[in-house]
Image (cartoon, grey):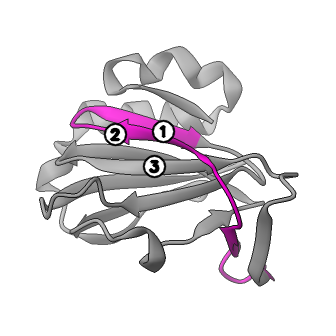
Amino acid sequence: MIVDHIRNLKNYVTLNPNIQTVVDYIEKHTLLEVEPGQHVIDSAVKLIREDYVPKPLMQCYFEAHQVYGDIQIVLEGTEIFGYLESNDLKFLVTEPYNPEKDVKKGQSLGYFSTVLLTKGMFVMVFKDELHMPKLSNGTQDLVKKAVFKVKL
């Protein structure tokens, strides 16, 4: 998992060539003006623009992907983002990997790491990295987010 500010995203393009597509898209578009919903950028990059109120822990879950990594950018608001090592013994699978949706879901049976994401920050997760987005920090503030799905 990588956590950084959006102004530094270009520093990570060597990790995957599809990250350059994301950087180019951000330079040409105002993400807050993109309508909420799913958008196809090209054959290897998709964008999901979301508006939501973060949820309490009991309504959230960990997820992991195998085909697409995530670059999740907070455009407005704040949320807590959870992270758990993929081999952590405290992870309990609640939904096995679904190749059609490219997701495995589960819960932690103990402690896990968190980071507070604020406006302008992004988190990048790759194959099999367990992550929990949309976790409330105790406020009811609306979060506006851009989630780029980047083919690995």
Q: Which residue has dot 3 on it?
A: 81
Q: Which residue has dot 2 on it?
A: 117
Label 2 vs 3, first from the N-terminus: 3
Return the residue nearer the eye: 31 or 97.
Answer: 97
Q: Amino acid at mark 1?
A: Val
Identify the image quadrant of the N terminus: top right
Q: In the displayed orientation, state which residue is furthest to the front.
A: 110
Q: Which residue has dot 1 on it?
A: 123
Q: Are marks 3 and 1 in contact (CB under 8 Å)?
A: yes
Label 3 to label 1: alpha-carbon separation: 9 Å
Q: Is residue 115 visible?
A: yes
Q: Are marks 2 and 3 in contact (CB under 8 Å)?
A: yes
Q: Which residues are magenta?
A: 97-124
Mark 1 residue crowding within 10 angstroms, few (<14) / some (14–19) / many (20+): many
Return the residue nearer the eye: 38 or 71.
Answer: 71
Residue visible at 14% across and 62% down in the picture: 142
In x, y percent, where is residue 26? 31, 36
Label 3 vs 1, first from the N-terminus: 3
In x, y percent, where is residue 147? 41, 55
Q: Amino acid at mark 3?
A: Phe
Secondary structure at numbered mark 3: strand
Q: Which of the 4 image quadrants contains residue 92?
A: bottom right
- Is 114 a magenta residue? yes
Secondary structure at numbered mark 1: strand
Q: Are marks 1 and 2 in contact (CB under 8 Å)?
A: yes
Return the residue nearer the eye: 117 or 123.
Answer: 117
- Is 91 a magenta residue? no
